[in-house]
Amino acid sequence: MRGWPLIKLLPTKTDFKFVKFARAFGILSAVLCVASIVGCFYPGLNMGIDFRGGASIEATKPAGQTIPLDSVRAAVSDLGLGDVQVQGIARRDTNVIDGSSVIISFQVPEGQDQTEVVRNVEAAIDRVAGEVTYSGVAVVGSKVSSELFLSGMLALGVATLLMFVYIWFRFEPQFGFGAIVGLVHDVILTFGLIALMRLEFSLNMVAAILTVIGYSMNDTVVVFDRLRENLRKYKTMPLRDVIDLSINETLSRTIVTGVTAIMVLAVLAIFGGESLFGFSIALMFGIIVGTYSSIYVGAPVILLWGVKRGGEEDPTPVKLGMASRP
């Protein structure tokens, strides 16, 4: 078929003037970051069981019989118990995962009797799974949930710091600063999306944000590596032109990588069920803003800071979008 594969339709060389619009997009990013931070406090994040606390019970059927996870999750969710998690586990007697034993975790609404809530959950499970044997109820208290939340935030902070150290040693300080600004930007906007869409913020979301950090850093490294190479190659070219050239040269790679990842995540969001929907949406959004930040956050920071060429500081003006072009 002529024109196949479709990747051939992408232009091999582009000449977009990204830096020209850096000021406008910088203002937009700042406004969105402020709005995201406000949204994380009001109305706030929709905490899941991992961070809010709740109860869990173990349900088991005779060996060889399976418990329908999706049906159980839907039945318990219909009770209005917030975030419901259903996970298959190994049987206690055989230590084998055969679908006959599951853990159901759910939230106990304030003001409701825990015993009554558990009884309603067991009745809902019986309707869709048949005769089931239940183990004792385990309660996740608020103290444990707070510790999990602090651990999750600490993981995000340490990951961001390590990425900064990596860029600092691989490139120059201004590259490291540009990368960290881009990472913080991506994390804040992803939190903003979670708050806006009222997605359940659980350990799965922490994993999604950590993945966003890794993707964003990967894309930033590609752009920065080409930028450093071009700075050595075009020593007299204005810095803003070198930045535009470097982004254009890596643009097709960025588009192909991003679109491929988003296609996979879209399938996961559609067919992966309720438990993976929020995870997939957060990752798709993170890939988009991660690509955006590499172009309009990380690189413009380097333009504002300037770089050294042959021991001399680049004389690039700091007013984005207002410097004259040769």
Image (spheres, rainbow, N blue to C red):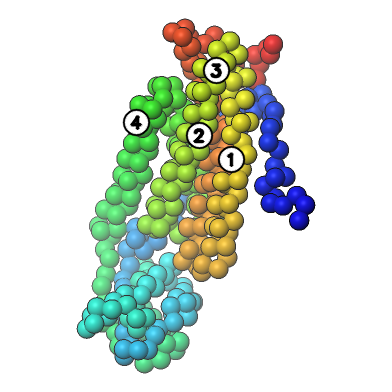
The residue sitting at 68% across, 32% down in the picture is 13
User: Which mark is first along the chain, 3 or 1?
Assistant: 3
- Label 2 and label 3: CA atoms lie apart by 17 Å
- Label 1 and label 3: CA atoms lie apart by 21 Å
Residue hosting label 2: 222
- Residue 136 in view here: no
The mark lying in front, picked from 1 and 3, is 3
Residue type at mark 1? Arg
Residue type at mark 4? Val
Q: Which mark is residue 299?
A: none
The residue sitting at 29% across, 58% down in the picture is 145
The reply to whether discs 2 and 1 touch (Cβ–Cβ < 8 Å) is yes
The residue sitting at 29% across, 54% down in the picture is 148
Q: Position of residue 52 (x, y in %)?
A: 35, 60
Nearer the observer, 164 or 37: 164
Q: Position of residue 163 (x, y in %)?
A: 38, 36
Residue hosting label 1: 253
Q: Position of residue 46 (x, y in %)?
A: 45, 57
Q: Which mark is residue 233?
A: 3
Q: Residues within 10 Å of mark 3 (few under 14, many from 20)?
A: few
User: Which mark is first along the chain, 4 or 1?
Assistant: 4
Residue type at mark 3? Lys
Res 197 quadrant in image: bottom right
Residue type at mark 2? Val
Side (left or right) of 48 relative to 144: right
| Element class at badge 1 | helix
The mark lying in front, picked from 2 and 3, is 3
| Element class at badge 3 | helix
Nearer the observer, 243 or 4: 4
Residue hosting label 4: 165
